[in-house]
């Protein structure tokens, strides 16, 4: 045994007459005295078996039980429980309280004032606390209601539509979540210029001094032609592909869409054609890539109706219109241009084209893989006898209630707040502009702030300010990593190079942050129907029908005027008679 002692179990009584212990009168057991027995039934709840907290060891006589029912648990009178000795041993123990004494609640000056003023002060403090509690409750309610309204608006927002109709015969090969793009990184050497085409006009520096107080009206350039030519329709790219200058071909618009794919919300699609060992990235005719997104990354939903002037489609068309006119208005239109190796490859002879230069550049992606892209710059400026290329883009304000910032009030004093708001609402568009400036190696990117003359007038605009940024500095400011951009392009190129020859399409999912790859037929997205000219007699018949339809409308107008004149002047009026006889003549023609 441990400690050298022995444990005695004691005598266990045996009842020969039945179950349970025998009668206690016949037993001579050495049991503790003064141990009470509290009868209870199974329905009664037991309070506590032993209360170790009720005894005050420092002063046992002070803390007597006030509840008579607790007396059954008091074993202080039993000599078999040595509690009194433990209390004597602990009588010298004192608990030391290390807390500092409480400070006066109202400061030193209240310490010596009369007690009759203290209740008044307490009432004032209570009232002040009640007012603060009411303000806090009102703030929480307002915040809760705002969150509910925002959540309801988000839930009421209709799901976005895909940029292209997915046909049932298309075969989905793979889907890539955007989360995998954030981990990619690839470094490319400096590109080389293969060819420069087009001509550039000089930038007018007077636009840098525009403020909301001396705004300028946005002009319209209807005579200048703008070209949005895809990759395979570019004659220069076809020539470079036949000369085996590269393996992969694309444009800066397509590359920037791929590079900034993780920031996109709206759906987009890119056509991929694998021809031999070459890869071509194209866009469809009428693709969303030709338009500019507005408020794409904003939390405030735009109207869903396509006919609304503030819908996403209408704003995209308006933004493209603003960018084209802005890029030509900020130039010095005196006839002086900087011409390059070849003229504009898409313009006809004698055609007036916009100021643009195309830089066909080549990047090395691998030992035997090169990429050629057509990059655009819109203007040129001379600084210290050195020419610098510029890209020109414009942000458009359509209604300040959507963005929460009024440009006319904030551009002069809080331009950084305006830019931060645009970076929040148009993160994808501004990242794509920056990527295009980096691809073209532009020395400066000019951002114009263009607003509507009136929030309900989407035809007339004014230029409020023009600000210039260096592309690399602006890219670091908006957290656009060049290595990550090229890592995304390299991964997609490697994936497409493993595919068989044919046509494919990359589609950004409209509701999920991922992109899907579909295998499509070779004749997909091609309109092979050509309208044949009608015979001359049929053409005359259709012209006559259109002319008669127009005359019917004119007759309806004349009939309404005749009834109006009849009510006003009667039939004797000469003007009414002329109108009436004119109607009769037209009716004879219709017959």
Image (cartoon, helix red, strand yellow):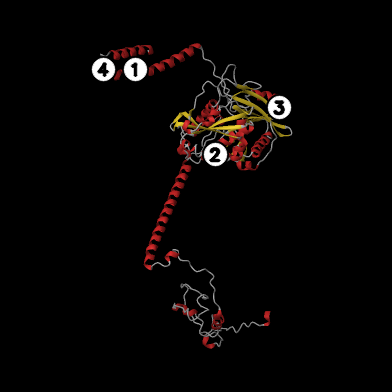
Give the position of the N terminus as an image quadrant.
Answer: bottom right
* Left or right of 56 on screen, residue 441: right
> Which residue sits at x=53%, y=15%?
533
Quarter-of-image position of residue 484: top right
Q: Which residue is mark 3?
A: 245
Residue 452 drawn above or below residue 589? below
Quarter-of-image position of residue 178: top right
Query: Where's residue 552, x and y in %?
Result: 38, 17
Query: Where's residue 110, x and y in %?
Result: 42, 65
Q: Is residue 211 visible?
A: yes
The front one of 54 and 394 is: 394
Q: Which residue is mark 2?
A: 423
Q: Which residue is mark 1?
A: 558
Q: Secondary structure at mark 4?
A: helix
Q: Is residue 164 visible?
A: no
Q: Earlier in the sequence, mark 3 or mark 2?
A: 3
Q: Are marks 3 and 1 in contact (CB under 8 Å)?
A: no
Give the position of the C terminus as an image quadrant.
Answer: top left
Residue 367 drawn above or below residue 117? above
Q: Earlier in the sequence, mark 1 or mark 4?
A: 1
Query: Where's residue 243, x and y in %?
Result: 71, 24
* Left or right of 217 on screen, residue 377: right
Q: Which residue is mark 4?
A: 569
The front one of 430 and 331 is: 331
Q: Secondary structure at mark 2?
A: helix
Q: Are marks 3 and 4 in contact (CB under 8 Å)?
A: no
Q: Earlier in the sequence, mark 2 or mark 4?
A: 2
Q: Are marks 2 and 4 in contact (CB under 8 Å)?
A: no
């Amino acid at each position: 045994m441990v400690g050298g002692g022995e444990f005695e179990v004691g005598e266990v009584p045996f009842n020969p007459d039945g179950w349970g212990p025998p009668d206690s009168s016949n037993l001579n057991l050495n049991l503790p005295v003064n141990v009470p027995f509290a009868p209870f039934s199974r329905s009664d709840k037991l309070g506590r078996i032993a209360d170790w907290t009720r005894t005050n060891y420092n002063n046992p006589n002070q803390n007597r039980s006030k509840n008579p029912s607790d007396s059954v648990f008091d074993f202080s009178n039993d000599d078999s429980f040595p509690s009194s000795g433990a209390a004597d041993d602990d009588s010298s123990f004192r608990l030391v309280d290390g807390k500092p004494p409480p400070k006066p609640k109202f400061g030193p000056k209240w310490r010596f004032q009369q007690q009759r003023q203290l209740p008044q002060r307490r009432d004032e403090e209570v009232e002040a606390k009640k007012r603060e509690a009411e303000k806090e409750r009102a703030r929480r309610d307002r915040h809760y209601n705002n969150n509910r309204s925002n959540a309801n608006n988000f839930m009421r927002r209709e799901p976005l539509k895909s940029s292209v109709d997915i046909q049932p015969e298309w075969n989905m090969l793979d889907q890539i979540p955007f989360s995998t793009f954030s981990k990619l990184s690839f470094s490319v050497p400096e590109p080389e210029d293969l060819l420069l085409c087009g001509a550039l006009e000089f930038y007018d520096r007077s636009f840098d001094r525009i403020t909301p107080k001396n705004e300028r009206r946005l002009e319209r350039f209807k005579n200048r032609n703008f070209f949005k030519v895809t990759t395979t329709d570019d004659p220069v790219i076809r020539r470079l592909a036949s000369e085996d200058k590269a393996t992969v071909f694309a444009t800066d618009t397509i590359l920037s869409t791929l590079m900034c794919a993780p920031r996109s919300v709206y759906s987009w699609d890119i056509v991929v054609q694998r021809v031999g060992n070459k890869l071509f990235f194209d866009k469809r005719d009428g693709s969303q890539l030709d338009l500019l997104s507005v408020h794409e990354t904003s939390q405030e939903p735009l109207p869903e109706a396509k006919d609304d002037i503030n819908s996403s489609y209408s704003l995209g068309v308006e933004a493209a219109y603003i960018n084209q006119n802005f890029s030509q208005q900020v130039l010095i239109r005196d006839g002086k241009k900087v011409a390059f190796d070849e003229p504009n490859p898409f313009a006809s002879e004698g055609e007036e084209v916009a100021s643009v230069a195309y830089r066909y550049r080549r990047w090395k992606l691998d030992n035997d893989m090169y990429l050629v892209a057509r990059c655009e710059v819109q203007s040129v400026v001379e600084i210290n006898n050195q020419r610098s290329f510029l890209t020109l883009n414009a942000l458009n304000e359509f209604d300040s209630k959507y963005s929460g910032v009024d440009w006319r009030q904030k551009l002069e004093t809080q331009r950084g707040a305006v830019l931060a708001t645009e970076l929040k609402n148009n993160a994808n568009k501004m990242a794509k502009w920056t990527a295009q400036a980096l691809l073209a190696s532009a020395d400066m990117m000019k951002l114009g702030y263009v607003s509507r003359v009136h929030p309900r007038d989407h035809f007339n605009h004014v230029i409020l300010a023009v600000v210039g940024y260096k592309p690399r500095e602006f890219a670091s400011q908006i957290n656009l990593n060049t290595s990550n951009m090229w890592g995304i392009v390299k991964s997609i190129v490697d994936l497409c190079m493993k595919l068989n020859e044919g046509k494919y399409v990359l589609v950004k999912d409209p509701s999920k942050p991922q992109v899907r790859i579909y295998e499509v037929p070779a004749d997909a997205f091609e309109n092979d129907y050509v309208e044949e000219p009608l015979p001359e007699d049929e053409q005359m018949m259709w012209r006559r029908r259109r002319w008669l339809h127009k005359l019917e409308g004119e007759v309806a107008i004349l009939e309404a005027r005749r009834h109006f004149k009849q009510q006003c002047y009667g039939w004797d009026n000469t003007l009414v008679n002329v109108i009436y006889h004119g109607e009769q003549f037209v009716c004879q023609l219709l017959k």
